[in-house]
Image (spheres, coloured by chain):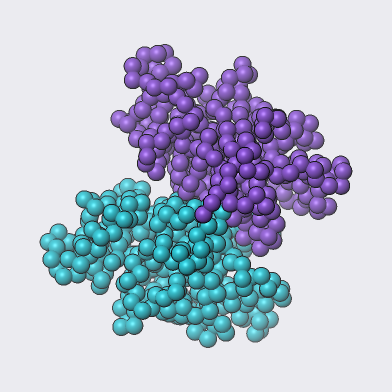
Chain colours: A purple, B cyan
Amino acid sequence: MKLASIDNKTRDGQLVVVNKELTKAVKVPEIAATMQFAIDNWKETEAKLQHVYENLNADKIPDTFDFSSARVLAPIPRAYHWADGSAYVTHVELVRKARNSELPESFWTDPLMYMGASDAFIGATDDIMIENEEWGIDFESEVAVITDDVPAGTNPEDALHHIKLITIINDVSLRNLIPNELSKQFGFYQSKPWTSFAPVVVTPDELDGDWTNGKLHLPLYSTLNGKCIGSPNAGIDMTFDFGQLIAHASKTRSLMAGTVIGSGTVANQGSLNGSSCLAEVRCLEIIKDGKASTPFMRFGDRIEIEMKDRNGNSIFGKINQVVKEYKK
Amino acid sequence: MKLASIDNKTRDGQLVVVNKELTKAVKVPEIAATMQFAIDNWKETEAKLQHVYENLNADKIPDTFDFSSARVLAPIPRAYHWADGSAYVTHVELVRKARNSELPESFWTDPLMYMGASDAFIGATDDIMIENEEWGIDFESEVAVITDDVPAGTNPEDALHHIKLITIINDVSLRNLIPNELSKQFGFYQSKPWTSFAPVVVTPDELDGDWTNGKLHLPLYSTLNGKCIGSPNAGIDMTFDFGQLIAHASKTRSLMAGTVIGSGTVANQGSLNGSSCLAEVRCLEIIKDGKASTPFMRFGDRIEIEMKDRNGNSIFGKINQVVKEYKK
């Protein structure tokens, strides 16, 4: 099934079930008013929501409305836990190569993961509000999953069963603030201002055979100002699958229902199908030409991120955002 | 006023107003069922809660019950944002000195801050469940504040007005997991499993003249297995006040109501009144003797953390926890 949160002037939005074609939706307050409530009580809500979804797809529900990505919030507008992995180690290797730095061997076996700000996820068509272009504005196209309650010490195989919902995200990054933050070793903070989500989240069964072993085997398209920057396949070169990422996150403590786990920038070795962020484009230029020629994003730039199924239909709807100047 | 969340078998607990002496409490579902609801709607809820608090202190409320720290959850059992500073730079300097490493000059002007896991804060008397003693279990006694909505780009002075609630916390740390995580530069993750809170949070006016300029000028007592480890004054040697910490956290994005900001381990230069974590005790031993003789915490160890007003009364109630073995 497919679920979204629409703007009803509350902090958590209104949960809706969306049809497979992303054209119609229906509110389900009798089952769950919010996405957090649904995932908090997934054992009770899942079957009921699925039932609504099937009836919606069969045109058996009268009170539907046209689903528009313009009205959506992030599917889970504020969450209690957001951990972003860096599962495509080939991307990290490339970034290191561009600055003549060796990749530690352990990076292939011990996942990189940072804790991100989960209190204000933004919607698929929300503007990306940034105060200063000089901060080096970049997008990062990723796959993300939402879990139910995960006990501490869960192993990678069991972790896969805790994945309830899947989507794609844009992990906005401020590249010029990153070196100082990483050098302090306490991780990203100011350099990761906003994370935006596709209009809908879907259950794993929606992805048919393209979701296997904790990986989503489809290309992820990133388009900047109408030009395709990349379409790497998210199922290729993902060093750590989502089961391994969740196991890493839950090694010393439990994860609460509604935890969002990200894949990190999707990247394929050699970048033959392009990149999922401008930083990677610039690293490739540095390796080839000795310097980067592609600038970071400017105010007015539009980023579109989308994943389509094998028939060319949008699975999650499109992230479609413009960077704008934030004035205090 | 003083507020707490008691266990009612829900994820967010039940908000209660607690009297000044921490002996009686009253539920206030007609004002706010949960702490998050209260802080989400602080402009409407604050005066109403304050009114209940005054009547409670004046013994004018019939439906009270005995307040027991055994029944409390963390005041905000799951929050949307938890950012921990390291505001007592003298502590960081000491840790660096013990490993013969220079403190970068910028650490005195640019706050260290990491994003922590906010989805499962634990209560004042909850056991600290850890799988492995070899991970190097330690407490960290800190001051923390809870904000309302903070716009992006808020300056330190304005930030002070967003501090609505204050408390003390235990930021449990797994010392032997930290070096590997910091070396990866993505910050703490597995090494910061649990954060526990004092039984109550209080509004700044409760602290009389001891809360000034974004600092809490009182000693914070940490007692391990009945032995006082330290009582440094939280108002001394705090390089960055809470206004500066909040301004740092909100530089590139807004903070949602209910954001928790921590001070980092409270420490005074020279550690004359002891320390707020075992890591600091061990660093002092290394500097003095060449090696650490104090072990980290073991299963069965009890940590008590408390702050008293000038009359010797407990302000927030006592954090009083035992470390126990977590079995999968």
Question: For the view shown, which residue lies furthest in the right direction?
Answer: A289
**Residue B301 visible in the snapshot:** no
Q: Quadrant of residue A294?
A: top right
The answer to whether residue B19 shows anywhere in this view is: yes
Q: How many labels were placed on the picture?
A: 0
- Residue visible at 55% across and 74% down in the picture: B239
**Percent from the top left, x then y, of residue A322?**
59, 38
| Side (left or right) of A58 relative to B269 | left
Q: Who is closer to the viewer here, B290 or B214?
A: B214
Residue A285 in percent (x, y) is at 82, 42
Residue at x 60% of width, y 36% of height = A143
Q: Is A286 on the left-hand or right-hand side of A59?
A: right
Please name the residue shown 29% across and 59% down the image: B46
Residue at image x 39%, y 22%? A65
Who is closer to the viewer here, A248 or A172? A172
Q: x and y percent of residue A194 in the render? A: 55, 46
Percent from the top left, x then y, of residue B276? 50, 74
Q: Quadrant of the N terminus of chain B?
A: bottom left
Viewer-nearest residue: B215 or B192: B215
Is residue A208 shown above or below B81? above
Between A138 and A205, the residue placed more toward the observer is: A138
Left or right, residue A142 beside residue B83: right
